[in-house]
Image (cartoon, rainbow, N blue to C red):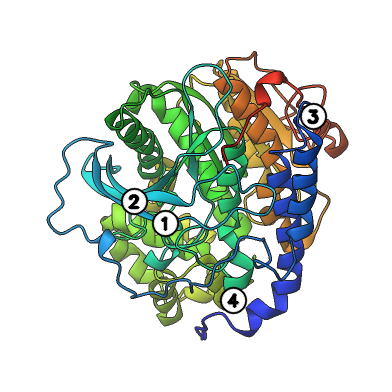
Amino acid sequence: MTKITRGGRPWRARSASFIATSILSTTLIAGAGFVAHADESSSKDQDFGATLSSVGSSEGGALGSSGTGKAPEQGDHDAFYDTDGVTTTTPGEILKTETVPYNPAPRGMKGYVPKTVDRIMYTTTNAHGELTPVTGYIMEPRAEWKGKGERPTVIIGRGTVGQGDKCAPTRNWPLHNLQDPVQSGRGVNLEGIYDVAFAKYGVRVIVTDYIGMGTDEVHTYMNRLDQAHAMIDAGRAARNIVEKNGGKFGKVAFYGHSQGGGASTAAVEEAPNYGKDLDVAGAYASAPPADLNAVQQNIDGSDLMGAIGFTINGMLARYPELRPLLEEHLNEEGEKALAATAEMCTDEIMDNFGHQETRNWTKDGRSLTELLKDMPDAQKALEDQKIGNGKPEAPVMIVSGRYDRNVEYNQAKVLAKTWRNKGASVVYKDDFMPPIGEYNHLAQAATGAPYGLDFIIARFNDLPVKGEGGDYTTESSLQGSSQSSSEGYGLLGSSQPFLGSSARD
């Protein structure tokens, strides 16, 4: 029987490794906003050095950006997410806004981010074509955009943060003067540092909570259309805010790692149909779960095994006809696991379900993979979530890691090859990290970020796509895939003049 815990010893046992990974992540992501600029002044270089020295220090928390507030717990009420009396009429419309504190940036990057951001509720369309409220936040950077055209907007889908309302990005760091991810234990919220990296370039940032996280329905984890629409409509929401304030709206791009990588690829594929009114410049996806069947087989027994509970809960919300079929096969432990994961964040599923197997959830001891062979309707529901049946019109970069124990390596390469065969513009890269155990997946959020950041900035500036293609079918050389300087994408290879930016004091 699974014993449900809330943080505690399992987190402390892995905290040292996590902090080391956090230092790597913050260094690479924050560094992407500094090292690439050959024309920056020495004072900026000193600022960057200060940023790196602050990481891991006790002052300002482990990331130099920690507040004093405690992360929310399940059941903590926040009236902003109440949807009673909210009327949805048009995708992208703004239903609510609220100005909230934004945590101080790590030292050396304070001049680029504002002290507050706007938390928003906006309208999107779910997989059944029904209008529904979804939440997110928008950050207007202090840095000037010096690239082509109007200030662009990057739409960020976060990686797997959980399924409970308390896990929503809008309720966690770097908002509300909360403790940073290392201090709070909600490690996956580390991706909030993406905001700062893009702000350095003067790029507007909007982050979606996805459907059902924060609001009063189940978060439909990894539902292809739900996440695609939430991303696209976040772009419309940003446009509505900018134009209401008298500004001109520029290009948009999609960006994400893990669940966010799936959301990014789903959005760029769906944009030619659902988002024709947006000027989509490109998309970046790190470790995208494009084939859920391959991914669930890979994570069954891993530290993120509990995410299978997220997937099943989300499936049942959109395919309620599957519930009787599932109940035939689930034992008591499986039923309790689904109920528990629906309210958990990722750190909690790692503590409670890490390295367990789905066969422990079934009456006859078969794994989910084995059960699916006898459940064609469930197979069809999984197939509906497969990314790659359409074709993106904007260029895409995909990064996948051969040592990723969570999101299956080859299925992301298959997506890249599938799109290329249809004539899409795709740049594929292997993640260059050597094996570091269960932390390869988390680390890739950082190791891929410099490539993704430069790729998106290049798209905003209408530069030619460099390095199209890649070795999709064999395990290509890690050394070769990390040599970004020849292509112009990556921490070491970017010296284009358009990358310069300035911050306002």
In the rendered image, the vertical position of residue 71 relative to residue 503, given as above or below? below
Residue 351, disc: 4
Left or right: 491, with 142 as reference point: right
Sequence-wise, the earlier of marks 1 and 3 is: 1
Report the Cα–Cα distance between label 4 and label 1: 23 Å
The C terminus: image quadrant: top right
Residue 206, disc: none
In the rendered image, the vertical position of residue 222 relative to residue 76, given as above or below? above
Residue 218 percent location from the top left of the image? 32, 60
Report the residue marked by disc 1: 170
Left or right: 432, with 161 as reference point: right
Report the Cα–Cα distance between label 2 and label 1: 8 Å
Residue 462 percent location from the top left of the image? 57, 15
Left or right: 271, with 469 as reference point: left
Report the Cα–Cα distance between label 3 and label 2: 36 Å
Report the Cα–Cα distance between label 2 and label 4: 27 Å
Asked which secondary structure carries label 2, the reply is: strand
